[in-house]
Image (tube, rainbow, N blue to C red):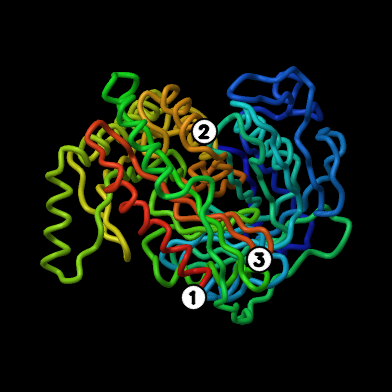
């Protein structure tokens, strides 16, 4: 996308300069961007009847109504450069935290809500969300002299893993604080009916959370999950599919409502090489970058294959070398790389895939990792590329349809937004989208955590259970402290 996003090189945010934000090729000119074909519901992968249920939209975080483009007010968007805040997360107010995306100290944090859409189930949930954003951003009045990815109008999103699941969410915050390549900015977003929301640039100290937490099993006990893994291995050996990713959940109840800011700061501090995120109550630190779009350039980091960290440098190196030599881990990883390559190749003029996996060492585990870079053809946003990639074999399996059916049969739960795309997109189509891993869904004092493992013909149920346990630890630590 190369929208005509005009700038005000020296004007002030309030001088009325118009900048036309164009999110995609199509401007909807007042027509509802979600037509009757995309407004239906879906169950078990089957499209619903047209017009049965429209998305729910909250405008200005005040009222909810079925989506109609005529009801959308015109967003007033103003980005201004500010002194480097150094620590983005230290500036988040409470209540009001709505979104965050942080990697090695850079990224975006948002608070308040200018608009939100909750999308019904269906394979068209990505397209429906993007059409809504196009209508919203294309009509916005934008002044953006900062002019970097993440300035101007920005939306954060989190999508369900399974197309049969309700609950995908896109949020446009009322205020966004960004930091990138030594520059920082604040963007205020509103409907023009009131003064712009100004976020605090002085550090805010969240209150310490109580460490008193009660833990309990999720949908399956450990033994039941091992039986599910054994059943999956049997199906793979019978030739039904090549790989499936099975997940577990775990539930926690704290003594008080969980402060999102505390979780984000603990995760970002302990896992700086991961992408620490928050969106509509889903919080985590994912190591897996599904897609980054910066102009025509894209990149992805494919992870599959997991080993623990060693207690010494020698043990650590030995565990990593054993994983690189493991036929089971390499097979699991190759399926994940192939699914990303096959999805991106038709979208790119150039695609470069690292010929052999390397090791990505995190604080608690290490993974096999393959970098993928490319150059896009055509006018696709980061969100549309993420939609083309999901679900990858790293979180679903191979072939995807058979793996999805087996996941529904064996996991005994709805994953919700776990293992779905999570990230942000701006008015130019740039953005970062990761896979929602090492995460939890929050509801007041309650949290639901997730962890999963790739299952292939050589998988051992007990070993897979042992592999899943460290994947819970980032969120367990974040909640307990």
Mark 2 or mark 1, which is nearer to you? 1
Q: Quadrant of residue 137?
A: top right
Tell me how far mark 2 sits from mark 3, CA to CA: 32 Å
Q: Of callouts 2 and 1, which one flags the residue occurring earlier in the amino acid sequence? A: 2
Query: Picture coordinates of residue 58 (x, y %)?
Result: 80, 47
Q: Of callouts 2 and 3, which one flags the residue occurring earlier in the amino acid sequence? A: 2
In the displayed structure, does residue 294 sit left or right of residue 318? right
Task: Give 170 or 449, whichever is nearer the viewer.
Answer: 449
Tell me how far mark 1 sits from mark 3, CA to CA: 15 Å
Helix, strand or loop at label 2? It is helix
- Count how many numbered circles sit on residues in the image: 3
Label 1 belongs to which residue? 481
Task: Give 252 or 159, whichever is nearer the viewer.
Answer: 252
**Is residue 198 depicted above or below 115 in this figure?**
below
Label 3 belongs to which residue? 445
Tell me how far mark 2 sits from mark 1, CA to CA: 35 Å
Per the rendering, the mark at residue 449 is none
Residue in the picture at 74% in, 28% down: 33
Q: Residues within 10 Å of mark 2 (few under 14, many from 20)?
A: many
Q: Are marks 2 and 1 in contact (CB under 8 Å)?
A: no
Can the viewer see residue 1 in this picture?
no
Residue in the picture at 16% in, 71% down: 312
Q: Residues within 10 Å of mark 3 (few under 14, many from 20)?
A: some
Per the rendering, the mark at residue 387 is 2
Query: Picture coordinates of residue 186 (x, y %)?
Result: 64, 65
**Is residue 479 depicted above or below 369 in this figure?**
below
Helix, strand or loop at label 3? It is loop
Q: Quadrant of the N terminus?
A: top right
Residue in the picture at 33% in, 40% down: 454
């Amino acid at each position: 996308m190369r929208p005509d996003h005009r700038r005000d090189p020296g004007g002030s945010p309030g001088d009325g300069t118009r900048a036309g934000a164009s999110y995609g090729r199509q401007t909807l000119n007042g027509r509802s961007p979600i037509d009757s074909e995309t407004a239906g519901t879906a169950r078990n992968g089957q499209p619903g009847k047209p017009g049965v249920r429209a998305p729910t939209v909250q405008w200005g975080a005040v009222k909810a109504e079925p989506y109609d483009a005529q009801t959308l007010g015109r967003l007033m968007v103003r980005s201004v450069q500010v002194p480097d805040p150094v620590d983005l997360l230290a500036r988040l107010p409470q209540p009001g935290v709505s979104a965050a995306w942080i990697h090695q100290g850079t990224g975006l944090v948002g608070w308040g809500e200018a608009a939100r859409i909750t999308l019904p189930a269906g394979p068209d949930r990505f397209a429906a969300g993007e059409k809504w954003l196009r209508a919203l951003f294309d009509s916005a009045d934008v002044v953006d002299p900062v002019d970097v990815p993440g300035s101007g109008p920005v939306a954060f999103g989190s999508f369900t893993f399974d197309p049969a699941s309700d609950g995908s969410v896109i949020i446009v915050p009322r205020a966004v604080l960004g930091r990138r390549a030594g520059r920082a900015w604040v963007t205020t977003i509103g409907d023009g009916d009131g003064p712009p929301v100004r976020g605090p640039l002085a550090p805010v100290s969240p209150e310490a959370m109580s460490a008193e937490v009660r833990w309990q099993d999720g949908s399956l006990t450990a033994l039941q999950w091992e039986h599910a893994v054994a059943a999956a291995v049997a199906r793979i050996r019978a030739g039904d599919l090549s790989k499936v990713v099975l997940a577990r959940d775990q539930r926690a109840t704290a003594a008080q409502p969980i402060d999102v800011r505390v979780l984000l700061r603990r995760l970002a501090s302990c896992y700086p090489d991961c992408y620490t995120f928050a969106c509509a109550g889903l919080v985590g630190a994912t190591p897996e970058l599904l897609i980054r779009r910066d102009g025509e350039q894209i990149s992805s980091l494919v992870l599959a294959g997991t080993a623990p960290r060693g207690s010494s440098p020698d043990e650590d190196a030995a565990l990593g070398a054993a994983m690189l030599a493991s036929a089971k881990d390499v097979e699991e990883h190759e399926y994940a790389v192939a699914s990303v390559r096959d999805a991106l190749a038709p979208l790119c003029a150039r695609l470069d895939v690292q010929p052999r996996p390397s090791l990505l060492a995190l604080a608690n585990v290490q993974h096999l990792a393959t970098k993928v870079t490319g150059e896009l053809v055509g006018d696709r946003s980061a969100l549309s590329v993420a939609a083309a990639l999901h679900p990858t074999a790293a979180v679903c399996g191979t072939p995807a349809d058979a793996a999805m059916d087996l996941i529904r049969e064996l996991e005994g739960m709805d994953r919700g937004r776990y293992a779905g795309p999570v990230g942000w997109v701006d008015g130019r189509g740039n953005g970062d989208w990761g896979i929602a891993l090492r995460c939890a869904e929050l509801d007041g004092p309650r949290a639901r955590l997730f962890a999963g493992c790739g299952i292939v013909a050589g998988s051992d149920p007990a070993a897979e259970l042992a592999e899943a346990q460290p994947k819970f630890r980032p969120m367990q630590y974040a909640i307990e402290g």
